Image (cartoon, rainbow, N blue to C red):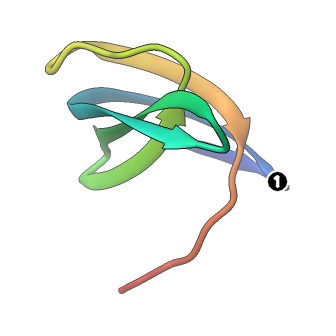
């Protein structure tokens, strides 16, 4: 995972992906495993379990640890 200011790039393996409705838009809540950390991300397309993907975007959220 590479983080620069508010942007990030993540390469990880999809653990799960489920459809969610957010503001009348269907997105896929996808859990990625990367560097021993699980991240939940919202994607426009469903990702198959076990598939390795690279995503880049803006990070928002809360740390709960």
Q: Which residue is mark 1?
A: 6
The residue lying toward the viewer, choosing from 26 and 17, is 26
Would you identify the image quadrant in which residue 31 lies? top left
Taking the view exactly as shown, the residue that stands out farthest to the right is: 5
The residue lying toward the viewer, choosing from 63 and 16, is 16
At 57% from the left and 76% from the top, the residue drawn is 62
Taking the view exactly as shown, the residue that stands out farthest to the bottom is: 65
Q: Is residue 43 left or right of residue 11?
A: right
At 66% from the left and 28% from the top, the residue drawn is 56
Q: Is residue 48 left or right of residue 7?
A: left
Q: Is residue 8 left or right of residue 51?
A: right
**SS of the residue under disc 1:** loop
Specify the quadrant that holds the C terminus. bottom left
Q: How many marks?
A: 1
Taking the view exactly as shown, the residue that stands out farthest to the front is: 24
At 49% from the left and 39% from the top, the residue drawn is 21
- Mark 1: few, some, or many residues within 10 Å (few <14, many ≥20)? few
Up-down relation of residue 10 to residue 2 (above or below): above
Up-down relation of residue 37 to residue 18 (above or below): below
Where is residue 5? Give x, y as percent: 85, 55
Where is residue 12? Give x, y as percent: 35, 29
At 69% from the left and 52% from the top, the residue drawn is 59
Where is residue 48? Give x, y as percent: 22, 13
Q: Is residue 3 left or right of residue 28?
A: right
């Amino acid at each position: 995972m590479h983080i620069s200011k508010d942007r990030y790039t993540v390469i990880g393996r999809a653990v799960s992906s489920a459809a969610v409705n957010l503001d009348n838009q269907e997105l896929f809540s996808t859990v990625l495993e990367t560097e021993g950390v699980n991240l939940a991300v919202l994607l426009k397309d469903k990702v198959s379990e076990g598939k390795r993907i690279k995503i880049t975007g803006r990070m928002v959220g809360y740390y709960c640890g």
